[in-house]
Amino acid sequence: MNATAPQASAPASVTALSAGTWVIEVMRLTRWELYLAWRRVMTKVLIILLVISYAIVVGFISFAIVQITNQPVQSGQSFQCPPDATGCVTPSPQEIQQMQQDQAKQRAASLAQFSDPVTFPTSLGFAATFARIVGLLLICILAGALIGSEYGYSTQRLAFSRDTSRLQMLVAQTFALAVISMILVAGMLVLATLVGLTVGPALGVSVSAPSFGGWMEIVKFFFAFSFSLFAYTLVALVAATLGKSTVAGVGLALGWIVLELIVGGVLTGIGLILENVGQNRDLGHTLQHIPDWFLGNNVGALLGHAGQYPIALAPDPGPDLTFARSLIVSLIYCAIFFGGSYLLLSRRDVTE
Amino acid sequence: MDATVAPAITGGNMLAEDVVLRTTGLTKRYGKRLAVNGLNLDVRRGDVFGLLGPNGSGKSTTLRMVLGLVWPTAGSLSLFGGDHGESDQRRAALRRVGAVVEQPAFYPYLSGRQNLRGVAIFAGLDSSSETHKRVDEALGYVGLSDRADDAYRKYSLGMKQRLGIAAALLTQPELVVLDEPTNGLDPAGMVEVRALIKQLAQRGITVLLASHLLHEVQQVCTRVAIMKEGNLLAQGEVSDLLAAQIGLQLGFDDPAKLQQALAALQSAAGSTPWLRGASLTAPEPGAWIPPGGQLLFVDAPLDQAAGVNALLADAGLYAAELRRREGSLEQYFLALTGDGASASPPPPTSVPSPSTPQQGGAA
């Protein structure tokens, strides 16, 4: 140690330097959490994984479009029977023309179906569908690791043994997860825009600029999409806090996603069977609608409501899951996750 | 939000503002296990206060309660006069504290400098150039300037410990809490840390440290509290604790002569002003063990060796060995806890704090 240390290291003041308000401190902590997320190698790996997997999917779609575009329209000669064929009737020129028109229509329909993901603005909707599967898994991994590692490294005591309160830390972590969700969604939408403006036109698909209403839909869609991911990062938050580890944060969050899918599928299946068999019709109906209370269905419905008109970026959520109901159910989930985390954190001893 | 300390008068004419930390009946229970049992501690401004005890004695739990990491089950804790149970007062008090709890904990993928900037944020400091300057100064103080931009995971154990100390000093604290500060350090590192603690004390910073290394504590601490199994066994000035141990130690090659010598000195104690008493004691570990396995401890000034010899000679007794015993916390601790081979003269069960006459007693 440097025995002739600068005097500044000696205690000079009783009052802490430039102590900010609660909110300012939370903002600083949020920025710190974001910095930690960015500095983790895992973050970069997950971003690369997301981009590469999206690029692979776009690549497959582009390949399919090229195949469809290059598929030749059968000439009239190809409909004629071979000279030695028996029982073959050569279609008339009108029939051949009709068949060629049908083929062209079929190809146009296939092209339209495949070109949506690589054509702006519908490419945004496809990016959201993609990110709600792959992106959701990756952001849950990141969130679980970010919160859980505080326990793994024992760095929580760095904060709590100083001026930072447990509520401040939790709020900062929650804000950071919200910002990360928004950054991921913004990144995906930018990527989808680039793909839609370059890949689609390059493959011969025409691009049209959205109307004002279309832009508003995109903005609403951005927030709904971000919220749909953020809600699941809160699952990782409460799981990591409960299990005090990265493994718990990641594992329970991913488990939640899988469980929702499985339980939802099973309940819907059993419900359908009961309803169709005719016995226990009410029970079947009830079982089918239990998944309507699941987090995934409700944030999905919000996404559907936000992306309906005029571009139709997301599928119609149906009449049961109204916007207000989906929003309230989703917010209740978020409140339970945040509140649960706070209860755990505030009452718990920080030990090894 | 800063803690305001009312200068109330406490016992022993000590102002409340002179007491940096006071615990009253502080208790922590983990399920059925009692980790800390009714602890009464006073740490005064300027103290280098050592919490002594074997592993599992409750030292770290006590420090964690001081730092707001562990919630007490019962009792109260006052830091800089503030009630630790009140969130605002606790936060205000913790701004004046720097701490290293057990192994330093930092983000392994960040550099030492980045970690300290994070600590600054946790401590409520902004990211101004002044804060960055403080970070650099703290790094320089612990000799880590050259490695400041290396990832923490690449640091040696000693460097990690130093970074922990730098983090503790970053906010220019009035109280520095160190938990086993020399754990894992090589001998040179230990010497450096001890020197640093002494420097802090010279600058008027109060230091509260926990250690099971009695020799280390004896070298740096002015006051100590001894804990075992969650209970406070003794508390007081190091010099006061050791005073009861200082004396002369005699060995005899015949147990019968030992008993005669004991009787002779005990009877002489009434008529010899400097002779305060005599008792049997066990040899220190590694020392010569006389026949019968016991030595004679004479509670007398160290410069009265000749006088003791003369008293024994008058009774026709001659010691096979006579040596001065300077006293050590280790001996005191072993005698107090009843551990080890030593059976030093019964020490005081507690050395009460001057301000709180009965607080040092075993809980």
Image (cartoon, coloured by chain):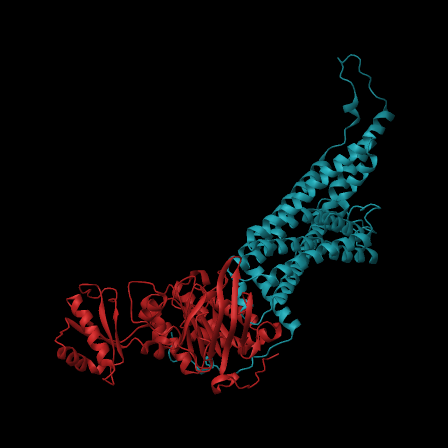
Q: Percent position (x, y) of residue A327?
A: 78, 55
Of residue A95 and residue A297, the one placed in the foreground of this image is A297
- State which quadrant residue A96 falls in: top right
- State which quadrant residue A102 falls in: top right
- State which quadrant residue B190 falls in: bottom left
Q: Percent position (x, y) of residue A283?
A: 80, 37
Q: Which chain is cyan?
A: A
Q: Percent position (x, y) of residue B285?
A: 25, 64
Name the residue at 53% across, 86% down: B9
Q: Percent position (x, y) of residue B231?
A: 45, 67
Of residue B349 and residue B256, the one placed in the foreground of this image is B256
Q: Quadrant of the N terminus of chain B?
A: bottom right
Name the residue at 36% across, 67% down: B213
As drawn, is B40 to the left or to the right of A164?
left
Of residue B45 and residue A64, the one placed in the foreground of this image is B45
Query: How many numbered discs?
Result: 0
The answer to whether B96 is drawn above or below residue B59 in the figure is below
